[in-house]
Amino acid sequence: MLQEFKKFAMRGNVIDLAVGVIIGAAFGSIVTSLVNDIVMPVIGAVTGGLDFSNYYTALSSKVEPGLSYADAKKQGAVLGWGQFLTAALNFLIIAWVLFLAIKGINRLKSEEPPAPAPGPTAEVKLLTEIRDLLSRR
């Protein structure tokens, strides 16, 4: 059983997948930092400090108006549509950054030259020889 596991674990695609997951996690933290530390402050400065994360609708009469979203959640049921909107905006920004990064990486890849046109098949060569022999008679 140990040999079977070793054979499975050492397959190329399993190792490639593991490397991809590790690099993906590292790249994810870079993109998250880019969004949280660079892009969102710029968007906040452009929109005058607009922050949707504290917008909510109280679903319980126990929730006092004017509280932050975190404090309102402690008091009762709230519909945190601002948190959802912020998460959706973050997703769109992350998706856009990843799109641009992948597009840039694809530009760096060298394109393979087109494969040369395949020559005539053995059958075509044989038929050509027969045709040539018949035309000489």
Image: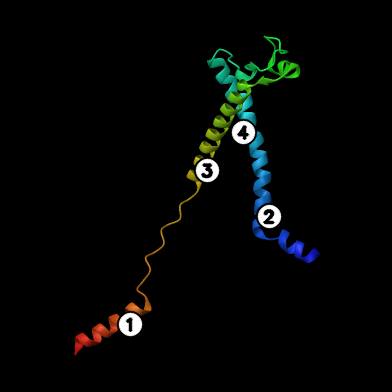
Q: In the rendering, which numbered label is found on residue 105?
A: 3
The residue tagged 2 is: 15
The residue tagged 4 is: 31
- Who's the residue at 76% across and 62% down the image? 6
Farthest residue to the bottom: give it: 137
Closer to the chain start, of discs 1 and 2, is 2
Q: Is 132 left, or right, of 66 in this rendering?
A: left
Q: Nearer the viewer, mark 3 or mark 4?
A: 4
Give whichever of 57, 1 is nearer the camera.
Answer: 57
Give whichever of 84, 106 is nearer the camera.
Answer: 84
For mark 2, give the secondary structure: helix
- Residue type at the position of mark 4: Val
**Is label 3 in contact with label 1 (beta carbons under 8 Å)?**
no
Q: Is residue 123 above or below residue 58?
A: below
**Marks 4 and 1, how far apart at CA:** 61 Å
**Marks 3 and 4, how far apart at CA:** 15 Å
Closer to the chain start, of discs 3 and 4, is 4
- Residue type at the position of mark 1: Leu
Q: In the rendering, which numbered label is found on residue 126?
A: 1
Number of marks in picture: 4
Q: Nearer the viewer, mark 3 or mark 1?
A: 1
**Is label 4 in contact with label 1 (beta carbons under 8 Å)?**
no
- Residue 47 in percent (x, y) is at 54, 15
Q: Where's the N terminus, which quadrant?
A: bottom right
- Residue 86 in percent (x, y) is at 60, 24
For mark 4, give the secondary structure: helix
- Residue type at the position of mark 3: Ile
Closer to the chain start, of discs 4 and 1, is 4
Closer to the chain start, of discs 3 and 2, is 2
**Marks 4 and 2, how far apart at CA:** 24 Å
Q: How dense is the environment of label 2, judged by Cα within 10 Å: few (below 14), some, or many (20 and up)?
A: few
